[in-house]
Amino acid sequence: MSREVRVGVLASGRGSNFEALWSASKARRLGARVVCLASDNPRSRALERARGFGLATLCVDPGARRGRLAAPAEAEIVQFLRAERVDLVCLAGFMRIVGAPLLDAFPSAVLNIHPSLLPSFPGLDAQRQALEHGAKVSGCTVHLVDAGIDSGPILLQVAVPVLDADTVETLSARILEREHELYPRAVRLWAAGSLRIEGRRVLARDPENSRQKNSRQIQKTTH
Ligand code: GRF
């Protein structure tokens, strides 16, 4: 029998997506197990909740580079995730750009969730960007992380209409509800070995019918 896929989460703040992943894991609806959480913020609610759940946790000092992790902090996170035998890393409101040390340690195995339909509105304040641009539809995206900002291949997306009466708060709240469904779905697909990458396209087989159901690695097809 193949080993259970082990998930490590990186989060900086509120942690509602972390909790959605953790709840699905606890209810055995994730096809994987959330085993640990690392944060760059000692006051993050995600960290507090993870400790409460009895998960292994790590809090790093991110250093002074705005928006990025200092090299020692990133190395510490990689060491922690390896010690926890993590297969898949999920960024969930992690407010730092990750770099080569993490991406090389977990090839095709770092996911992020973003509150817009990428490639529209990457970066900070995606919901505000959508509203101010006058978009009629926004949504959320789970994607593989690459060296850019919210620029990696897209796994799953769901659309959320922008209503005339929306404020940043109301739109964010409706998108967040969908995020909590989308992220566990994406992790289930990854964990079932149901994804194949062809260039920028991530193709999903139906996990129930997949003969390679238990292969952990995403297959890469080169052209
Ligand atoms: C979410 O909107 C997520 O899409 C974005 O940051 C927010 C984190 O929220 N990357 P939470 O900490 O998971 O509640």
Image (spheres, rainbow, N blue to C red):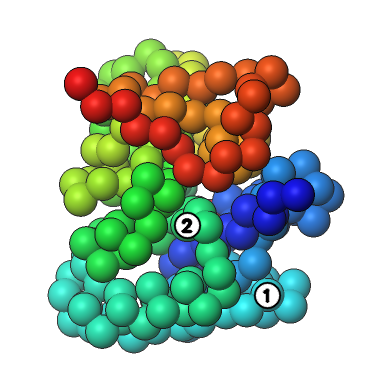
| Residue under the image location 27 percent in, 33 percent down | 121
Mark sitting on residue 151: none
Q: Which residue type carries mark 2? A: Val
Nearest the viewer among 41 and 128 is: 41
Q: Which residue is mark 1?
A: 55
**Residue 190, relative to residue 6: is it above or below?**
above
Estimate the spatial distance between the alpha carbons at disc 2 and disc 1, rounded to whole Å. 15 Å
Q: Looking at the picture, tell me which residue is in the foreground, 177 or 208.
A: 208
Residue marked by disc 2: 89
Q: Position of residue 2 (x, y in %)?
A: 69, 50
In front of the other: 208 or 70: 208
Residue 34 in view of the camera: yes
Q: Callout 1, which amino acid?
A: Leu
Q: In the image, what residue occupies the spot 75% across and 49% down?
A: 1
- Mark 1 Cα-neighbour bin, 10 Å: few <14, some 14–19, many ≥20: some
Q: Is residue 55 left or right of residue 66?
A: right
